[in-house]
């Protein structure tokens, strides 16, 4: 949206609201939250805004998709208070989070590719089958109902490691009603193999847990393929939103400097 920042024109709340598809109450709320600079007042107490306020609103609305409401609000408040270093720090945090999310996605995709490869202790009879039609991996029926020892040997890890993963929520085995031993069903074996691949990639348990939860909520690895595609698309959209927000914020910062 183009504005003549040198005109010094006055805008009513309704003008600012209509120009951005908002209600006048939303504009007032944004001012009270520090998203917009404080408005001037007429002799009768009515708010009057300027093209600079319109720039501020442009910046805030552009920041929203990439940063979320809380961060976008904090960024604008920091800028309006003259604390630009704090605003840049908040923006850096959003970019760092996006990079972390990208790395997590890459780890999941890599783990899915590697899941079909037999582990150090695996045999051909217990290896995971990999489909050539997709990266989806399914666990064979022979994998169901295993005890901790055989599963640990297949993965080439110690039983204590599986118990540690259970405490971290990565696997959720049931208990044999007669012996009380842990029993790893098909989904548990899948989760253990995915956790094993991610651990081999150097990922800590705290980062693996949300990935395992993604698999569970998707209903398995095969349905997760669609989730991963959507995940990639959303990360790309978020990255572009961060760029768009940065451009509008830079325009607002230049407008503030020009006015000063």
Image (cartoon, helix red, strand yellow):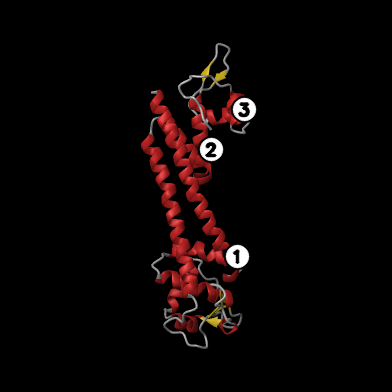
Q: Residue furthest left?
A: 85
Residue 24: which numbered mark, if any?
3
Q: Determine contact: label 3, label 1, CB under 8 Å.
A: no
Q: Can the viewer see residue 34 in this picture?
A: no
Between circles 2 and 1, the one closer to the viewer is: 2
Q: What residue lies at 47% left-to-right and 65% top-to-bottom?
A: 208
Between circles 3 and 2, the one closer to the viewer is: 2
Residue 190: which numbered mark, if any?
none
Q: Can the viewer see residue 158 in this picture?
A: yes
Pick whichever, 149 or 85, lies toward us. 85
> In whole angstroms, how far apart are the C-alphas of marks 3 and 1?
42 Å
Q: Is residue 25 above or below residue 45?
A: below
Q: What residue lies at 57% left-to-right and 15% top-to-bottom?
A: 45
> In whole angstroms, how far apart are the C-alphas of marks 2 and 1?
32 Å
> In whole angstroms, how far apart are the C-alphas of marks 3 and 2?
15 Å
Query: Which corner quadrant of the image does residue 203 belong to?
Result: bottom left
Q: Determine contact: label 3, label 2, CB under 8 Å.
A: no
Quarter that holds the C terminus: top left
SS class, disc 1: helix
Q: Position of residue 132 (x, y in %)?
A: 54, 77
Chain-order first, disc 3 or disc 1? 3
SS class, disc 3: helix
Q: What residue lies at 62% left-to-right and 33% top-to-bottom?
A: 21
Q: Position of residue 119 (x, y in %)?
A: 44, 81
Q: Residue tagged by mark 1?
A: 218
Q: What residue lies at 46% left-to-right and 69% top-to-bottom?
A: 110
Q: Within 10 angstroms of label 3, few (less than 14), some, or many (20 or more) residues?
A: some
Residue 61: which numbered mark, if any?
2
SS class, disc 2: helix
Q: Within 10 angstroms of label 2, few (less than 14), some, or many (20 or more) residues?
A: some
Q: Is residue 87 above or below residue 105?
A: above
């Amino acid at each position: 949206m183009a504005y003549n920042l040198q005109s010094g024109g006055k805008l009513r709340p309704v003008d600012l609201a209509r120009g951005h598809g908002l209600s006048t109450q939303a504009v007032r709320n944004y001012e009270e939250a520090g998203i917009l600079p404080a408005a001037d007042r007429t002799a009768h107490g009515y708010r009057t805004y300027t093209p600079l306020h319109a720039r501020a609103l442009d910046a805030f609305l552009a920041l929203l998709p990439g940063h979320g409401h809380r961060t976008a609000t904090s960024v604008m408040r920091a800028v309006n208070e003259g604390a630009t270093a704090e605003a840049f720090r908040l923006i850096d945090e959003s970019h760092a989070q996006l990079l972390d999310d990208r790395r997590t996605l890459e780890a999941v995709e890599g783990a899915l590719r590697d899941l079909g490869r037999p582990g150090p202790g695996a045999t051909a009879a217990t290896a995971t089958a990999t489909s050539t039609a997709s990266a989806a991996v399914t666990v064979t029926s022979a994998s169901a109902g295993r005890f901790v020892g055989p599963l640990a040997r297949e993965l080439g890890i110690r039983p204590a490691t599986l118990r540690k993963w259970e405490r971290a929520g990565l696997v959720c085995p049931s208990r044999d009603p007669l012996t009380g031993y842990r029993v790893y069903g098909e989904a548990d074996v899948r989760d253990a193999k995915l956790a094993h691949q991610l651990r081999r990639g150097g990922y800590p348990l705290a980062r693996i847990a949300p990935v395992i939860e993604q698999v569970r909520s998707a209903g398995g690895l095969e349905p997760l393929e669609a989730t991963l595609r959507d995940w990639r698309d959303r990360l790309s959209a978020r990255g572009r939103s961060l760029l768009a927000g940065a451009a509008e914020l830079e325009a607002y910062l230049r407008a503030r400097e020009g006015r000063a």
